[in-house]
Image (cartoon, helix red, strand yellow):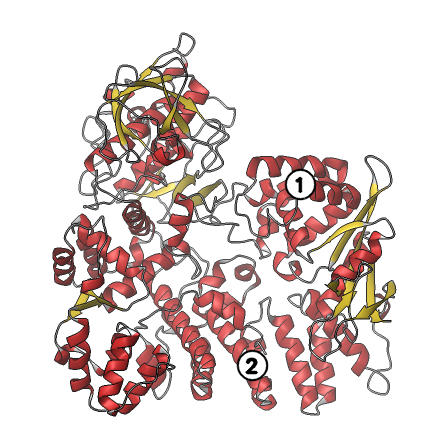
Amino acid sequence: MVLSGRESLIRLVGKRRRFLPNRHSILSDPIPNPIIPLSQQPTIAGNINPPNDVVHCPICSLTLPSDNNHLINSHIDSCLSQPKQSGTKRKLTQRTLLQLNFTRPDNLTHAPDYTRQEQFQLTENHSVDIDSSIITTTTSPSLPSISNNVDTNHDIIDDNHDIIDDNHDIIDDNHDNDDKGNVFGVKLETFIVGRRYTDQVEICEGATFSLLRDPQNVKDPNAIKVISADSGCSRFLGYLSRELAQYLSPLIDSYGIVVQGHVTSVPKHSLDAVPIQIMCHRTPNGESEYEDETFKCLWKNAQDVVEFAIKNPSSVKYQQNFCLMLQEVLRNNIHLLTEDEKTYIESFTSLSNDSQRLFIRLYTRKGPWFRMSNISYPEILDAQKAVKDLAEKEFVCSVDHGNQLCESDMNDILDVLTVAELREIWSFLLKKRCGHSMKKQDLISSILSTYAGLWPHLSTMILDRTGFCIKISSKAESLIWRIERLFFLNGEQDLLSFLLVDIGKIKYPTYSCTILDPIFSNRTNLLAYEEAIEVAQIMDEALDANRTDVVLRCIEIAESRVSTVLPIQYSTSESQSTFHHIFTAPWIYSKVITLGISFLEQERRYRDTVELLKWLQNVYTCDVKRGYWTLRLSVDLEHLGYIDESLQVAENGLLDPWVRAGSRMALQRRVLRLGKPPRRWKVPSFSRSVLRKIPEVCVQGRPLNSELGAKNRFYNEEGMQCGVEEFALHYYAGEGWQGVHSESGIWLTIFGLLMWDVIYSDVPNVFYNRFQTAPLDLGTDGFYKARKSIIESHLQQIRDGMAEEFLIKSWETHNGTACRGVNWDRHSLDELRAAVTCVGGSCLSSFCQLLCEDYRSWSSGMPDLLLWRFCGEYSGEAKLVEVKGPKDRLSEQQRAWLLMLMDCGFTIEVCKVKPS
């Protein structure tokens, strides 16, 4: 039986850490002490303390810290690159801007010290007017700014220099803008890639070619083909790199430039990248357009890509991605790092390419220990020297003698051995032959138990076989884990996300990333959050190992921490309506305690659960889990025989605005069941609504099995085996209905496609990186509040019959793009169009509004079947059916959905499949 809240905790923890810095103190402190004094705890979602000196941007009036020159310059570039709302381009440059009133304001009483706006464009740069992110060089997702030095990026200004001198000149790396503005006649040295996708046509040195856009390319809509120009027939030679095509494609599409070139040399292997030289040619009608700021910025970015490739000829993609992640965290979360940590990160950027690549390779492997004899990568030329350099900088630690091993490392180092080597050691220790049936983990456990207390001799035996071994240092692992967490903001994504984008497996949506406030206001909040995640991981591990004592310990720690550090602001409705509370330690501890309650209920320790549930309700006065807590409290009180108190808890819960959906339905039904005379004489006002009759239909079938707890299986009319849902689909097909069995799946897909423009609309502080499938506030009350006007306008258009048009547009424009809830493979466009047409605009609008207002509460529990049938060419009817087998009954969430759908105007039905 899966404990309630376990899956949520596992997603929260993500990939388990090999090293937990606070494990020992968490498990051994006699009394859990909070790490944050209450007096020092800031507001969870509040502003950061304002700086003393700030300046105002003359374009958008945003407040910027005067001591951060890089931030100011990047922000100006971003503002300059943005078109006016009227659609005209800005005729301003940094030089003219700096002659304006860009001074520190007087009598400033409040201003945030962290203001940044940027946009991420991953896949769809079809029009320059649609997306201006491709001209913001400091946020280019493809161009890393850190390779062998933190200041490698040509767009980063050295913070030790002034931006403005006495003559208002700009002192930065953009001093060569005039040269980079000369597009025509400038030769760019680059490469032809993707040779494996061609017919491997032989290429000769000096061969000429032209470039052809390939907007229908499923991997990259910015793709640019290289077409031979030497023969009568056009031959496909390969592609330009994705990074360069990102900026050249809008120049070709929107400005009509023509690019031609020739091969400068031929590689040894036919599939290797081919060095080429390209040059742009002007068109007669494009002279005026070539002078605008967008055109110049695009061209400059293209040159930057080429220059970076020249200066880093041997860089590999995963190294670039890792360095990009470091750069983003350093830029956006610098206030969360100590000086030692900043120095430590900078020491990594000063390492050789071999050392950087080896560290990244090891960090992404399982480990923790690695045999040096097994380390071999084609892109790492000298692994021995790389290890030596990493060890000097304390990024790895190594052992080559048995006396260097600690007893705590024994289990991990044994895992490096092969099964044959383990059998050899096992046979030596036990003085008998090892059976071939023993598995690797059984051998390790047997060796450790046999040789307990004599580990120095055992460590020598191990190192004699493994030789020199290395592992990532605990210091490096902890810091990189923190950087990953700050970058991705969850535990489910890691460096693999970069790879999946690079190879085209995942395509993330296009959205504007406007960051005005950081997620963590200070380091104290971050450390508390990290410790809470450690407690969650320890509890998860303890449940796997059936360590009841550790589970109880984690519950005790969570309760102690929350009682001491929970800020008053966390309990307010305003903080809970946004997403910021999910990045706090109290929120994580609430999940630990909720899982602990499920564990205690399984152990039938109802008195303990009642105390915890009462405590949770008193502390977390504004939380979406209050419905679940109230329901469990009422149920557990009934288990203890306190019926009157159980009824009172249920009645009070119905007055709580945070009790919603299925939990509210369950409490209403409990009140009706427990509140009969003589306990209650007055019938509740909601009784008629809750007790409404839900239409039912009974279908008989020949059962395949009738085992208790097993999934019901039946034979359909063709004699084939099927589940109750498929059996019901056959039944309704006989009445002329078409349909699908997908429960909430098809509805979340329809919602995502219909509301795509709303979900990814330009709202500040909801998109923090380019790997999000939804804004961070989706699932909170703040989602609807922040977009109220655009949502209401969009829903009105759906009511007016625009749903199918929205659906088709989203499908054709964004097909394959990752979006929360959208499953592109499970349903065809024809099925979705038929469903949307038959459901009707009024019902769809009501459904979408419900999810916009409370996505978290209503994103599960939808009926099993969505059925439709056409009454004419452009009209039809739809029906939603919940299917139940023998002895099955509706859950409270399903009942809440069915009644809500009835209120929205849907036709619903419960189909009960019974044995014939």
Give whichever of 385, 626 is nearer the camera: 385
**Residue 214 versus residue 894 in the image, above or below:** above
Task: Give the quadrant of the N terminus.
Answer: bottom right
For residue 389, what is the image quadrant? bottom left
Q: Residue furthest top?
A: 284
Q: Residue 862 in the image: state x and y as whole percent.
A: 71, 59
Residue 557 position within the rendered picture, expressed as x and y whole percent measured from the top left: 42, 81
In the image, 606: left or right of 915? left
Quarter-of-image position of residue 194: top left
Q: Amino acid at mark 1?
A: Leu
Q: Position of residue 271 (x, y in %)?
A: 31, 35
Q: Nearer the viewer, residue 765 or 407?
A: 407
**Label pair 1/2, CB-CB below 8 angstroms:** no
**Which SS class for mark 1?**
helix
Q: Secondary structure at mark 2?
A: helix
Q: Residues within 10 Å of mark 1 (few under 14, many from 20)?
A: some
Q: Residue at x 38, y 59 (%)?
A: 485
Residue 91: tell me if it is visible.
Answer: no
The answer to whether 58 is drawn above or below residue 318 in the figure is above
Viewer-nearest residue: 717 or 885: 717
Q: To which residue does mark 1 refer?
A: 829
Determine the residue positioned at 34% across, 75% down.
35
The residue that disc 2 covers is 597
